[in-house]
Amino acid sequence: MPRIPDAVSVASLDTHRLIVAVPNEGPAEISCNLPRPVAADVLRQLADNLDSPAGRCATAILTGQPCPVHDAGEGTVDAFARGMRKVQRDEERPAMPLDPSDVRAALDFNAGRADQVLASARDVLLDVDVPRGPEEALAAARILLTAHARQIAALVEAHYSDTRTRWGLTRSTRGLLTGYEGARKIVTAYADGLADEQALAESAGNEQAPE
């Protein structure tokens, strides 16, 4: 018989900055009105805290796990409070231009999604509070297109492997497999070229930055 909860709490982004919902079945859902890199930092702090050693009460000592009574919640609240203090400090500072690290943080944040690059492009485009000019936009485009090209190369490689495993290397499949391998190399070279261009741009920017 399914358990019926005594009460149901309703949370929205009108009252909360970050909402994480983990249902009994299906994927977790995250809603936030924080910048993605800040939200990712808060979640990492929570994860680090949950992975910390168990408390020292009798239950924790016997089980080697945090006590559900004495340890539950306290560290999580502390971690979230630290994260929110960081958010408040960031909000007090003038808005900084879009940085390549912000785009890479968006990719890391969306790593588990069905289409990591598409979700990250959405987040970067929606984050209108972060100013960006032509150079910042070009850097974001390079980073996202590099990741997208590597996605495509991985898909081609997977199709190559699947075809070779299923049909083997024969006179009939040799040309097809050669085409797949050539396509993968072309896309990989395109991704590598974009990555090299971005690395050079960042290196030049670091040299010009005032010390």
Image (spheres, helix red, strand yellow):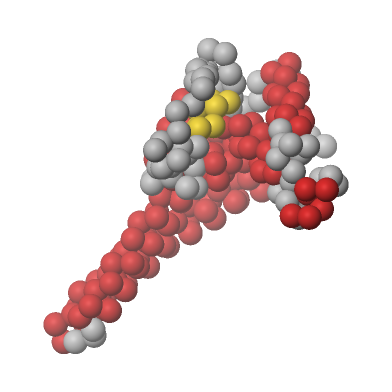
- Identify the image quadrant of residue 171: bottom left
29 in relation to 177, above or below: above
Q: Residue at x 59, y 45 (%)?
A: 201
Q: Residue at x 53, y 12 (%)?
A: 14
201 in relation to 179, above or below: above
- Identify the image quadrant of residue 43: top right
Q: Nearer the viewer, residue 16 or 125?
A: 16
Q: Residue at x 64, y 31 (%)?
A: 38
Q: Residue at x 51, y 22 (%)?
A: 6
Please state the horizontal and vertical placement of residue 152, each as a whole percent of the image.
35, 56
Asked whether, in this view, residue 83 is left or right of residue 185, the answer is right
- Identify the image quadrant of residue 74: top right
Q: Nearer the viewer, residue 48 or 137?
A: 48
In the orientation shown, which residue stands out farthest toward the right?
56
For the C terminus, the quadrant is: top right
In the orientation shown, which residue stands out farthest toward the front?
1
Please state the horizontal and vertical placement of residue 178, each as a whole percent of the image.
26, 76
125 in relation to 139, above or below: above
Please state the horizontal and vertical placement of residue 22, each as a whole percent of the image.
50, 37
Asked whether, in this view, residue 94 is left or right of residue 119, the answer is right
